[in-house]
Image: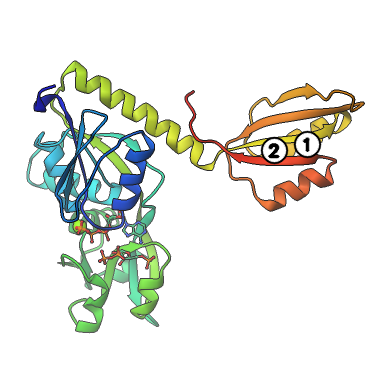
Amino acid sequence: MDKSSRLKVALQKSGRLTENSLDLLARCGLKYSRGKDQLMCYGENMPLDVLFVRDDDIPDLVQQDVCDLGIVGLNVIEEKRLSFQTRGVSPLFEQVMVLDYGKCRLSIAVPDGTEYKDASSLRGKRIATTYPNILARFLRERDVQAEVVTMSGAVEIAPRLGRADFICDLVSTGSTLIANHLSEAETVMESQAAIISTPVPVTMEKQEWIHRLTMRIDGVQQVKESKYIMLHAPREKLAEIRKLLPGSESPTIMPLDGAGDKVAVHAVCRENVFWETLEGLKGAGASAILVLPVEKMLA
Ligand SMILES: Nc1ncnc2c1ncn2[C@@H]1O[C@H](COP(=O)(O)OP(=O)(O)OP(=O)(O)O)[C@@H](O)[C@H]1O
Ligand SMILES: O=P(O)(O)OC[C@H]1O[C@H](OP(=O)(O)OP(=O)(O)O)[C@H](O)[C@@H]1O
Ligand SMILES: [Mg+2]
């Protein structure tokens, strides 16, 4: 197979999305070897190579067709989209699907003790951010004039350095804000990882692999939380027990040999199964309850 027919996928080299993205590709069946500091690795069993880059560069690499696919946060995708628009370039990369990791939000945060009512509190103030285009749109939509101070990182320190009054940065648990004596005031945008694809038509062969990969990713995401539950139950308790099975479709009900009116219930639950659920099932009359992980699923 010649090199140009191999899919090129851009991933973050080292950061919040790296481990989850590599894990996702591995769960999709990709075998690869990656040396420390290696910027590219070859898929050994799929025509797919991974390039490791700064996350901010991923939309450009995909837009310019250097890579066929990229995995990056919606926050970076949106910032790039708006920056392309500002420069009069149409953003042509396409969002293929969102992924279930990298969940965070872009928020306005204020130094502890500072009053914040709504966006009007930002009027005439300086706001430090790595996302100037998203912030500018947020301010424009609320008719607020403020100064956007663009920084490439360590935004949380800007108020202490006297460079800004407020910040607009990514938050997940909020511990970085707390450590920097800041409080979250308002969400500007919710984010999570997503896959984008090149705007340039790809060969049939590549298209076929993109399709297979997205189907597998779909399957991987579905099984992550899914569990296979097996239990025994008195037939008259079936309706109550079915109600307690989290996110399950039609369960399989089988008679139990020599066990009177007891049946075996097998069901795929598409939500996590907690101890509380098992206790509820037992309370409703279920016994011999087994919960197994689901490894692969193809709808
Ligand atoms: N605390 C968080 N929890 C979950 N996801 C996050 C968190 N912080 C950031 N992210 C998501 O992960 C992406 C990468 O975050 P990271 O902090 O590793 O980026 P970075 O410092 O810009 O890295 P790079 O060196 O690649 O430019 C963010 O753009 C966002 O989508
Ligand atoms: O609300 P929290 O759970 O504290 O997460 C938020 C922090 O996470 C990200 O940075 P990261 O830790 O990835 O490192 P970076 O600043 O070097 O990019 C983000 O830029 C925030 O600083
Ligand atoms: Mg970055």
CA gap, disc 1 to disc 2?
A: 7 Å
| Quadrant of the picture in which ligand 3 is shown | bottom left
What residue do we see at 38% from left, 81% from top?
112
Image position, residue 110 (x, y; %): 34, 74
Q: Nearer the viewer, residue 86 or 43?
A: 43
Quarter holding residue 88: top left
* Element carrying mark 1: helix
Quarter of the image with the N terminus in it: top left
Q: Nearer the viewer, residue 266 or 120?
A: 266
Q: Amino acid at mark 2?
A: Leu
Q: Are marks 1 and 2 in contact (CB under 8 Å)?
A: yes
Are there few (<14), some (14-19), or many (20+) residues within 10 Å of tag 1?
A: many
Name the residue that disc number 2 marks: 245
Q: How many marks?
A: 2
Closest to the observer, 122 or 180: 180
276 in relation to 111, above or below = above
Q: Which residue is mark 1?
A: 241
Residue plotted at (69% across, 30% down)? 266
Q: Residue at 41% x, 44% y: name it.
A: 100
155 on left or right of 172 = left
Q: Position of residue 67 (x, y in %)?
A: 14, 36
Q: Is residue 295 left or right of residue 264?
A: left
Name above or below for residue 298 compared with residue 137: above
Q: Looking at the image, which is closer to me, 24 or 284?
A: 24
> Residue, x 69% and y 38% (percent of image)?
245
Image position of 144 (left or right of 284): left
Label 1 is placed on what type of residue? Answer: Ile
